[in-house]
Amino acid sequence: MPKQPKRSRASAHAPRDYQLAAAKHAAKKRVKSHKNTKALLEEATTELNSQFAEVQSLYVAKRTAETPARIAEETVQNLADVMRGL
């Protein structure tokens, strides 16, 4: 039986495997430090709270009746936001 040629370590999946290994290493590095873990948790909590506030405001906005004064007020606020962005 003839010997099989040795396969090189570089395979078609090498870039994906490298990315996976790099991602795992980065995740371990982040979690390694207690301060980093606490910071990540605080960041995630802040993001969830802001998303919850957005959803809550949409729910409240749907329940309140749209009056012409309210529409005008929102238009002025939106225009002010746009102007601040410029």
Image (tube, helix red, strand yellow):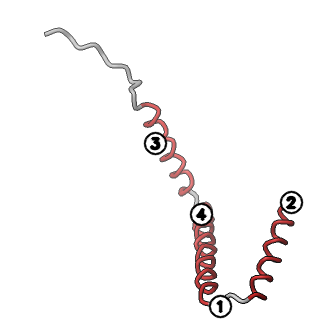
Label 3: how many Cα within 10 Å (few below 14, some 14–19, many 20+)? few
Q: Secondary structure at mark 3?
A: helix
- Report x, y in % for residue 41: 57, 68
Number of numbered discs? 4
Give the mark toward the camera: 1 or 4.
1
Type of amino acid at the residue the image marks with label 4:
Leu
Label 1: how many Cα within 10 Å (few below 14, some 14–19, many 20+)? few
Residue at horizontal 76%, vertical 87%?
A: 68
Q: How far is disc 3 from disc 1 in space, using C-alphas?
A: 51 Å
Residue at horizontal 13%, vertical 10%?
A: 1
Q: Are marks 4 and 3 in contact (CB under 8 Å)?
A: no
- Report x, y in % for residue 46: 63, 72
Name the residue beneath numbered marker 4.
40
Name the residue beneath numbered marker 2.
86
Of the image marks 1 and 4, the number of the one nearer the N terminus: 4
Label 2: how many Cα within 10 Å (few below 14, some 14–19, many 20+)? few
Q: Secondary structure at mark 2?
A: loop
Residue at horizontal 79%, vertical 76%?
A: 75
Of the image marks 2 and 1, the number of the one nearer the N terminus: 1
| Label ID, residue 65 | 1
Q: Nearer the viewer, residue 56 or 22?
A: 56
Name the residue beneath numbered marker 3.
20
Give the mark toward the camera: 3 or 1.
1
Left or right of residue 72: residue 42: left
- Report x, y in % for residue 52: 58, 77
